[in-house]
Image (cartoon, rainbow, N blue to C red):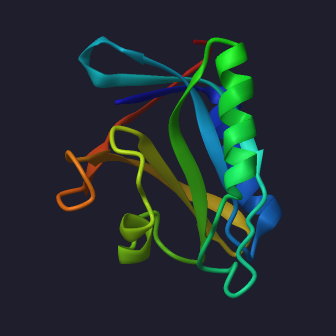
């Protein structure tokens, strides 16, 4: 399960609206609790560096990701997941999303943005032991007022 407060949940959905018709992307920072619950304590917006098809693909610059990870650790946070938007497409993972996902055990949150408005937001945990058997598993999102 992924637990996120309403402020961060609204922020990642708003990010998708702001970048429409291109995909947005970002990092979920927090901690892992017992029973495989990832708790989001902050989010970090990232720039989508895809220039070939930013309307249906995203990429986070590795240098930006390293910086976010370093700053998170300074605040006692780890990377617990990632988020991105699907402009005018369902909030379901695509074969490209699976192929480009490498952080096993992390959450991957997708928001469908329909005609510029955030619609459905879903989360998927990347399960498996390595690249050969990785798979996305549907994951519940628990939105709370404060974490």
- Quarter of the picture containing the C terminus is top right
Q: Quadrant of residue 87?
A: bottom right
Please state if 21 lies on the left or on the right of 130 as rendered. Answer: right
- Percent across and percent down for residue 75 are 70, 13
- Percent across and percent down for residue 28 are 59, 36
Q: Residue at x 42, y 58 (%)?
A: 101
Q: Nearer the viewer, residue 133 or 136?
A: 133
Q: Residue at x 65, y 32 (%)?
A: 69
Residue reaching furthest bottom? 52
Q: How many marks?
A: 0
- Percent across and percent down for residue 116 are 74, 69
Q: Residue at x 24, y 56 (%)?
A: 134
Residue reaching furthest right? 18
Classify 86 as above or below 35: below
Q: Quadrant of residue 85?
A: bottom right
Q: Nearer the viewer, residue 77 or 54?
A: 77
- Percent across and percent down for residue 70 are 70, 28
- Quarter of the picture containing the N terminus is top left
């Amino acid at each position: 399960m992924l637990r996120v407060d309403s402020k961060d949940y609204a922020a990642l959905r708003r990010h998708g609206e702001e970048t429409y018709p291109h995909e947005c992307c970002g990092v979920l920072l927090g901690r892992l609790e017992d029973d495989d619950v990832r708790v989001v304590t902050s989010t970090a917006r990232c720039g989508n560096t895809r220039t070939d098809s930013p309307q249906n693909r995203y990429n986070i610059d590795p240098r930006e990701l390293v910086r976010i990870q370093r700053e998170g650790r300074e605040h006692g946070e780890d990377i617990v997941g990632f988020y991105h938007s699907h402009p005018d497409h369902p909030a379901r993972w695509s074969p490209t999303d699976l192929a480009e996902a490498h952080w096993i055990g992390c959450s991957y949150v997708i928001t469908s943005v329909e005609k510029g408005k955030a619609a459905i937001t879903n989360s998927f945990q990347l399960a498996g032991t390595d690249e050969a058997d990785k798979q996305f598993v549907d994951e519940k999102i628990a939105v709370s007022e404060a974490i």
